[in-house]
Amino acid sequence: MQIDSQIVGLLLEGIRDTLYMVLVSTILGYALGLPLGIMLAVSDKNGIRPRPALYRILDIITNILRSIPFLILLILLIPVTRALVGKSYGSTATIVPLTIAAAPFIGRMVESSLKEVDQGVIEAAQSMGASDGTIVWKVLLGEARISLIVGVTISLGTILGYSAMAGVVGGGGLGDIAIRYGYYRWETGIMLITVAIIVVLVQILQWIGMRIAKKLDRRIP
Amino acid sequence: MAFLEAEQLFKTFHTANGDVEALKGVSFSVKKGQIYGVIGLSGAGKSTLVRCINLLERPDKGRILLEDHDMTALTDAELRKERQSIGMIFQHFNLLMQRNVLDNVCLPMEIAGISKKDARKKALEYLEAVGLANKAHAFPVQLSGGQKQRVAIARVLAGKPKLILCDEATSALDPETTGTILHLLQEINKKHQITMVVITHEMRVIEELCDEVAVLESGRIVESGLVSKVFNDPQSEAAKRLLLVRQTQDILKGTGE
């Protein structure tokens, strides 16, 4: 195998497409998953406004979506993707299934982050006459922020992994390159380089996320 | 006229191990400006009782009358408004760990809709009142237990309360720090005429702080009256037992433990 400028260009394009898919899907995933996670945490039987029926419904929907393997979800959602984006292949199209797969996952992580917040602090805010909205905003999200940032980091890594899987159906990005060159054309070298780049990307995202979390944590004396 | 009146409070908790009757018809009344103590051993129902006053716990039966208004009849919005004028101090301080001291004191003012700028200015005054203005930009994790409780007291003052509820406010503190916190609470009571209800299992807290005391045992008030009367001439078994606990502690201290 020769590494010529054409391949470098291809890989750079792959990195760009992957980052584009991952970042946009994470943002959209949080747009859906954050409210979902908040609703789960608030409506739980130990939440600030227990609503058992609502919790049960959200819980079931989240579990169903979470238990569908991503590759299957990708194929199941093709008609939806077509309707929304106009085509079912390429990196923009892949954002649709990525977002749908990420949202319940993110919702669960947000839920668990918010449930870690000390009950005593929530009670203190209630004793001051805080509304539910104020408690969510100032107490739950404020106190759980480190855990939430760690959650974003984990989400980015997971979504990056999913995005590579989307290569199987022409999803664009690094996964697409790995499948097309590595699998269909038997060019193991390119496949290995692609995998290495994915690993490095995950490491970098992880490192940045953890650094931010540590820097913002006020519980470290 | 009573400032605060609890009328026949009942509360039962339904747990996996069966029902627990925490309150079985508790009534008491507190005059304006008074520091009213409730003492009892753990499991007597003290915490439930104090939580019923601001309805963090809703009693199954009974009423809470604050300045003749029935707290149990308020709507959610009215209750939130009323709670803004009732401060609460907790055993474990319950400060926001991700906010600095100054912003912790700001919280009740933010809830009351005061602008962040005004709130910060006032918060500094309240921190001065508890002697912690120099810690305004520290985070709770950097403070000692006594300092954290003083921040919590400044936070309560920031809500301009007419009533302060203390739930085992000194139980997590060493004896010396307990003394300074009790002194501070007394000072606040004298200076601002703020009525207080103090829940504790320590006789010392009642002796040093309270005017009147009620002895709570298994969800019932078994004895109440002026502190001097109840402690010098206890009538109930529960009060006698509490005195005995105190005497034993004194003896243990005397022999150097």
Image (tube, rainbow, N blue to C red):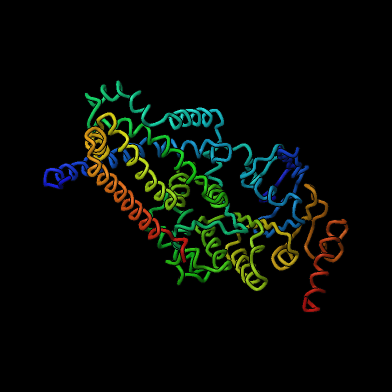
Q: Nearer the viewer, residue A5 or A215?
A: A5
Q: Residue at x 34, y 44 (%)?
A: A156
Among the 4 quarters of the image, the one containing residue A88: top left
Residue A90 location (% of width, % of height): 22, 31
Quadrant housing the C terminus of chain B: bottom right
Nearer to me, B247 or A166: A166
Q: Is residue A85 above or below residue B247?
A: above
Left or right of A29 in this view: B211: right
As drawn, A92 above or below B176: above
**In the rendered image, is residue B15 in sight?**
yes
Residue at (31, 53) in percent of width and height: A204
In the rendered image, the residue lying farthest to the left is A5
Counting from the top left corner in percent of width and height, residue B164 is at 61, 56
Residue A126 relative to residue B137: left or right: right
**Above or below for B179 versus A140:** below
Residue B186, image x, y percentages = 63, 66
Let me know if residue B85 appears in the view: no
Residue A166 lies in quadrant: top left
Q: Nearer the viewer, residue A3 or B169?
A: A3
Q: Position of residue B171 (x, y in %)?
A: 67, 62
Left or right: residue A190 compared with residue B23: left
In this rendering, the count of numbered labels is: 0
The relative height of residue B213 versus residue A139 in the rendered view (above or below) is below
Residue at 44% across, 47% down = A141
Name which residue lies at 61% across and 45% down. B56
The reply, left or right, for residue A89 in relation to residue B255 is left
